[in-house]
Amino acid sequence: MRATIVHYLSLLILVLIVCNEVNSQDDQDDSDLNTNPYRHREMLDPKGRYQLEWVVDWINKRVIFNVTAATSGYVGFGLSRKGKMGGADIVIGGVDARGEAYFSDRYAFGNQLPEIDKSQDWILHQALEEDNQTFLSFSRPFDTCDEDQDLPITDDLLTLIWAYGEKDDDILYHFQNRGAYQTYLLDPELVPNSYRTEEVNTNPIEIAIDTEKLPSDVSVFRINRNLTMPDNQDTLYWCSLHKSPTTTKRHIFGFGTKFPVESDRRYVHHADLYRCFAPPGTNPDDFFQKAVNSEGSECYLLSQPNPLPTTYCRESVHLWSAGGNPFFFPEHVGIPMSENGSEYFMFQVHYDNPELISGRHISVALEAYYTNNLRENDLGTMIIGALSYASTTVMIPPSSLAHQIVGHCAEGCTRKMFPLGGVSIVATLLHTHTSGRGVRVLHFRGKKELPWVNADDNFNFDFQQTRILNEERRVIPGDTLMTSCVYETTNRNGSATVGGYPTRSEMCLAAIYYYNRVPGYSDCRSEIRTQRYSDFVGVYNTTFVPEIRQTVITAPENYSGLPVETFASEVIDWNIGTRDEIQRLQLYQPHTSICGNAIPRPGPSPVLGSSSVTIPVSVAKPAPPKFLPKTATPPRGGTVFPRPVQKIITPKPIIDVLEEVEEILNNFLGTGDNQIRPSSTTSTTTRTSTTTTTTTTRPPPPPPIVSLPQPVFETENIAHISVLQKDGPRYQRKSSCKGRRRERH
């Protein structure tokens, strides 16, 4: 009895605290929307009839929701993982004809009337109805511990589902008065409300910015790209060069991607911005300006002489992916522009045309918001994850439910790239293609796994948003960053999935925005190059063939010229043992992390250290693919592909270094999963993208500008063991429910 009284007293105190919070918010004016990054306001209905405001209460670990709907009937609101009724956590409330409030916590089993939840975890604070307007204020904890009928509010993407009816007693009927809105409930606001348009946003999937409301010191660097899709080409990467609008240092503090025609959005997979560096001793205007006057060219068709100097544009500045909204960085950071006078950027757009629609005209524009009031810190951008092209590291068995791929930015790379005091991450963008279901950025210090930098275990390809972190993450030299991705491929008609540029292929990447920027360092990815992995997969060397935009096999000889995608789908026998073994190898085999500097060097340099080499950036154009007859049938179980009689191994510059690393690691580890052997897969060739024009694109091809010299870049190739431990402790999300929830990874 006493315990029951204490329980209800505790609940009463919590209600009073939350109600006081609501009342205090009512007393605040709209200026709080601009000062509290965790107070959000969105018009969910394009007709302006359903407005939601929510505030994150970090002290009490609750979210407070305020809904205003244009109705005198019921109001519905819910949380869903996939945007559907089934499995949604729903509340229904309103004010009846007697003026009394009603409110209930419910659970939906499908497209039917949601049932009353056995545990009423949502709390109603206020209900008002006046002039055909209903206002409800309610809240719930981040985690109710109701595993059966509630969804926890975490870092994961959630879909807010809403509806309203004309009557209080007809909950089933809402006609077209319903909708869904995707968001990260616990994230800070991306766009200050003072920058937003006051008009009702007719497109709830995009945050509308009123440029007239931007501060007087803010200007917009706008890059427009118009292109007609070529015939019979499902994937097109188009690159063009653009000059900075200023020759004096400015800070970019926000980005937006615009589509003048909304239907064009579905054809653009990503739109990225890269910084260009002229060769040493060369004037940037003399080197790049002619390229600015051209229409651009396809990025990944290689030819000599190179018609556009895109190989000199390698430092990542900004990445936009499908579904991304505009965003602005915190006030103490900005991406530097024109720090040393004239500066040039490359705009890369990935057009996706799986239906092979001919003649479709696509328009897309990137807006970079910059200021002459310099911020305290220079922001840099870095891509981390798994190398996905010219590699077999990303290989996912057909019809997989939760296959995991990881990519390392190893301790050796962070020691080389980051200053002694470390860097601070302020934002991330998680990225896969259409099979991705979860992405995490993991952080290791030695063998200890620290809390995740960011995570989304409910990843949606169509909503890839740059996210400002709730707390900045400090990364010091010697730390390891890992990108971990989970895939589901049950909709691939029994085909395996490999890494690559097309949307049907996969990637496992994350972009991190950090300060203070280290010029030139913007890419740190890894691949598996061990003999054991090559023997198991049955592929010993690969190359990227730009003419077909695929990675093809160059060894063994009897499969030379065969695309890795075809080999993985038609040659490998994906029985249970094969699936389990490749997953184990991908997680626990040693990786080689590749971290290069995008600033060209004055000439070829010698080996820099025990695991680094500087080489000219050049990719030999391979012969046309030759499909030799298969001389062996893949076995059932055991080894995936029988070793050929004569294994073809191409010597690589770093092989001697890897032999030394192998000896050290094998003496330390003994034999087993983390054993490194020199093989043809231990390559140090820096994979870059040069450009040429093609007659398949509608824009006129630019004339050759100049026979450009091949740049030289400093590149580190660091072989290392996997930081994952089979039986070691792993970080888990903190929960007041004592970890009873299952994690997908």
Image: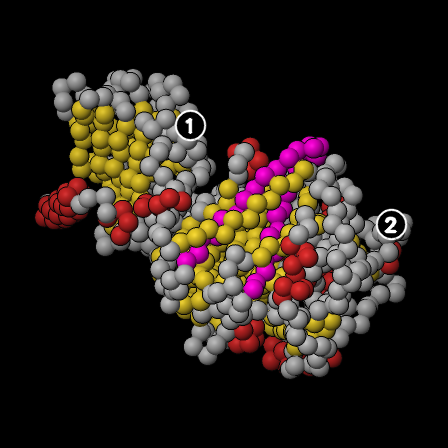
x and y percentages locating residue 189 in the rendered image? 35, 49
User: Disc 2 designates what residue?
Assistant: 627
Horizontal side, residue 725 vs residue 712: left or right: left
Q: Is residue 698 above or below residue 45?
A: below
Residue stretch in magenta = 342-371
Under mark 2, the amino acid is Phe
**Residue 424 appearing in the image:** yes
Distance from the alpha carbon under mark 2 to that under mark 1? 50 Å
Number of the label disc, if any, that sits on residue 152: none
Horizontal side, residue 73 vs residue 180: left or right: left
Under mark 1, the amino acid is Gly
Q: Is residue 640 above or below residue 355?
A: below
- How many neighbours does mark 2 have within 10 angstroms: few (below 14), some (14-19), or many (20 or more)? few
Residue under the image location 28 percent in, 24 percent down: 70
Residue under the image location 82 percent in, 68 percent down: 649
**What is the quadrant of residue 205 in the picture?**
top left
Judging depth in this view, the residue of 576 and 401 nearest the camera is 401
Judging depth in this view, the residue of 437 and 673 nearest the camera is 437
User: Disc 1 designates what residue?
Assistant: 110
In front: label 2 or label 1 = 2
Which part of the image, by quadrant, shows the N terminus?
top left
x and y percentages locating residue 48 in the rendered image? 34, 28
Residue under the image location 50 percent in, 60 percent down: 246
Horizontal side, residue 318 vs residue 300: left or right: left
Judging depth in this view, the residue of 143 and 27 nearest the camera is 27
x and y percentages locating residue 507 in the rendered image? 61, 52
Q: Main secondary structure of the magenta part?
A: strand
Contact, mark 2 vs mark 1 (Cβ under 8 Å): no
